[in-house]
Image (cartoon, grey):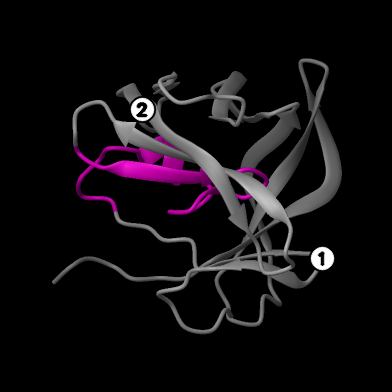
Amino acid sequence: MFGDVSSRRYNFDSDIIFRNGNAYLELNISTDEMGSTWEGTGQYFRSSGNQVYEWIDDRDYLLYDFSLNVGDTFIVQETNEWPEATELVVTAVDSITLMDQTKRKRLVLSCMDGTGERVWVEGIGDLMGLLSVKKSCFLDVNENLLCFSFENEVLYQDPDEGECW
């Protein structure tokens, strides 16, 4: 057996929570196909310029930095949840055209230990899934972002997958 398979929908709550003077939005999750039932995850996010932060262990945790260039290193910081820091190096920077024909910056990052690569898209995150960046370079974790929508419009759909739900 290859492990559990599940699909989830995420959105952000409209209520703002303040931590250390910064405004965060809580990530909500739904596991039903229609997205009719949502629960808060207790995970809070904010963006500032080209960076995205998550509030973890009573501090700001840099989740993404879209200002990086080829050759730059990004350190996936350790947390209580993932107790080992991981280094990624940017190997390519280009753009991707979304389904609404807008272009977004795309970064390709390789694991310094040679175990694989990640693709980040500005305004979306890791194409393995929003929270997958914390699991970078772990060989036994396999996640995939199927779709990304904004205001009920699908902007990204994995070309290897079927319909969004």
Say which amino acid is labelled 1: Glu
The residue identified by callout 2 is: 88
Q: Residue at the spot x=54%, y=42% of the render?
A: 94
- The label number, if any, that marks residue 123 in the structure image: none
Verify CB contact (< 8 Å) between mark 1 and mark 2: no
> What is the tally of numbered marks visible in this picture?
2
The answer to whether residue 133 is magenta is yes
User: Residue 124, how many percent across, how many down?
Assistant: 62, 50
Residue at x 71%, y 77% (from the top left corner): 36
> Is-magenta flag for residue 142?
no
- Residue furthest to the right in view is 15
Secondary structure at numbered mark 2:
strand
The magenta-colored residue range is 115-141
Lateral position of residue 23 relative to residue 50, left or right: right
Q: Nearer the viewer, residue 122 or 147?
A: 122
User: Which residue is rendered at x = 65% and y = 62% of the image?
Assistant: 98
> Percent from the top left, x then y, of residue 100?
74, 67
Whether residue 131 is visible here, answered yes or no, is no
- Residue 120, above or below 74: below
Circle 1 packing at 10 Å, graded few (<14), some (14-19), many (20+), is few
Neighbours of disc 2 within 10 Å: few (<14), some (14-19), many (20+)? many
119 left or right of 95? left
Residue most extreme to the left:
1
Between 121 and 135, the residue placed more toward the observer is: 121
Q: Which residue is nearer to you in this view: 105 or 35?
A: 105
Residue 162 in picture, x, y percent from top left? 47, 83
Picture quarter with the N terminus: bottom left
- Picture disc at residue 151: 1
Which of the two discs, 1 and 2, labels the residue nearer the N terminus?
2
